[in-house]
Amino acid sequence: MVDAPDCQFVLCQFGFFQNPFTFCLIRTGFDASKCNTSWKNTLNVHGQDEDWSQEFRLTSPQDRRFRWSAGINIFDAFQPGSAVYGQLFIGPFFTSAVTQRDAETIGLFGGIAYDITDDLTLTIEARLQEDEITETTLVDTTGAAIVPPIVFNETFDSFTPRVSLDWQYSDDAMMYFLYATGSRPGRFNTAFETSEPEVIEALRQICPSCGTVVDESELINWELGWKGSFWDGRATATAAVYYMQWRDGQVPNTIPVSTGTTANLVSVTVNNGDTDLTGIELEASFAATDNLTLSGSLGISDTEINDFDCTFCEQLTGSRTIATGNRMPNAPKLAWSLSAMYENQLTVADSRWDWYGRMDWSYEGSKYMTSANLTKTAPINDVALRLGMRNDNWSFEAYVLNALDHDEMIGAFHGIDLYTFFGFYGGSSGGRNEVRFGAPVPRRFGIRASYSF
């Protein structure tokens, strides 16, 4: 929510993510008598994705005590570039550079598995990957073509091992230990090469840790788990505890920069995420009768930010280090779900049908909006109901989504208010902080029908 003289605004976001996709952003005034009608804006983001992949794999016979596999994976992804444009209160608006992106990935992978005993198996796997990232900036933030285009190119190499030890101590239960690593290729902050010199200098003053090349990030995971079944397989359960380390995390930032009479919102990504994550995950399913199945899950997690040079925290609190010791944003401490599914058969006009009724109830605890941990969303209880029937060709389903009609926001993040940032309301440019949120979809009913042949 952003306060302005005699008027309040709320920022809502919705979209249709396809290929290509369109994302729409609309800003509306609550009181039309106090708000200029030109303050209703529409922004569109257009983009397109193309990719191609191929994998070759060799595998030994799997009925032996020692087993192996090896292969190569090739992946190519291409994005011709996207643009943000539309109608703002200041008139027609174009706000993003058009950058063509190409990613070529070659991965060599292999693994061995060895049955130490009949009940104990050791598996060791590894992947060696090379990512060549090329970004070509074709159009700058003013909409002007860059001649010649500016080309960024970098190759990122990663090695990600995975080790697991499985103990099948009975026919119906096993324990396992897992160690695994993962990585995310680097990218570029093209603004450090395509912006005006005074903007680049201002960026370096505000974010001295920012640079043109963003390094790879790494996630390290240790996990101990158990899986079992009971009562002749009618009940199953899994349990796991984990500890993860997120290092050199790629953290996106939107930095407000004002140089002379020009105001800029510059998006950069910084390698300053260093966070520990711990948690417990439980899942269970029980066939209470031949027709009724009950299931549920529980997740309890804790996160702690160890080191974070938080540029937007300085905008909020005046301190860049306030995030240290805080929880990660958008990470609830508690989440659980319960489901019940009843299935049976009936005969209609000499035709046999399977029919079912299902209830899904999920809970998500509150989440902090930013790493500053100043604002958080409310907990959400969401219930979905379904009743359907199907045969070999036809399927019908009636449903109620958000049956409790909850009105809690499903997510929120920090932004810079464009109205004050561009110097409206009689002041100099600079901007106020803004909360941008995803509004809930109200209770809705529907019927689905399909025919297969």
Image: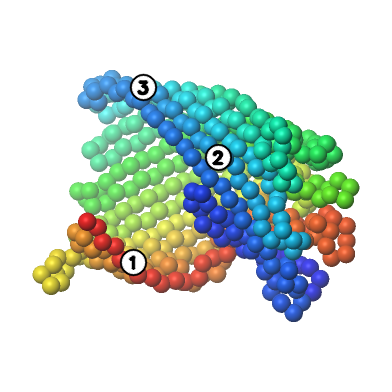
Q: Is residue 395 left or right of residue 149?
A: left
Look at label 1 and name its amino acid. Answer: Arg
Q: Position of residue 199 (x, y in %)?
A: 81, 41
For disc 3, the neighbor class at 10 Å (few under 14, some 14 to 19, many from 20) is: some
Q: Position of residue 96 (x, y in %)?
A: 68, 47
At x 46% / y 65%, what residue is drawn? 382
Q: Nearer the viewer, mark 1 or mark 3?
A: 1
Q: From this viewpoint, which residue is outermost toward the bottom?
A: 33
Q: Is residue 180 left or right of residue 135?
A: left
Look at label 3 and name its amino acid. Answer: Ala
Position of residue 77 relative to residue 125, above or below, is below
Image quarter where the N terminus lies is bottom right
Instruction: Give the SS element for disc 2.
Output: strand
Residue to which mark 3 is pinned: 70
Q: Nearer the viewer, mark 2 or mark 1?
A: 2
At x 37% / y 34%, what residue is drawn? 176
Q: From this viewpoint, which residue is outermost toward the left?
A: 350
Residue to which mark 1 is pinned: 448
Q: Position of residue 260 (x, y in %)?
A: 89, 47
Does any portion of residue 373 appear in the rendered image? no
Instruction: Give the SS element for disc 3.
Output: strand
Q: From this viewpoint, which residue is outermost toward the top?
A: 66
Which numbered disc, 1 or 3, marks the residue that appears first in the sequence?
A: 3
Q: Position of residue 65 (x, y in %)?
A: 25, 21
Q: CA distance from mark 1 to mark 3?
A: 44 Å
The image quadrant that residue 401 belongs to is bottom left
Viewer-side residue, 139 vs 427: 139
Residue to which mark 2 is pinned: 79
Position of residue 163 relative to residue 33, above or below, is above
Image quarter where the C terminus lies is bottom left
Q: CA distance from mark 2 to mark 1?
A: 35 Å
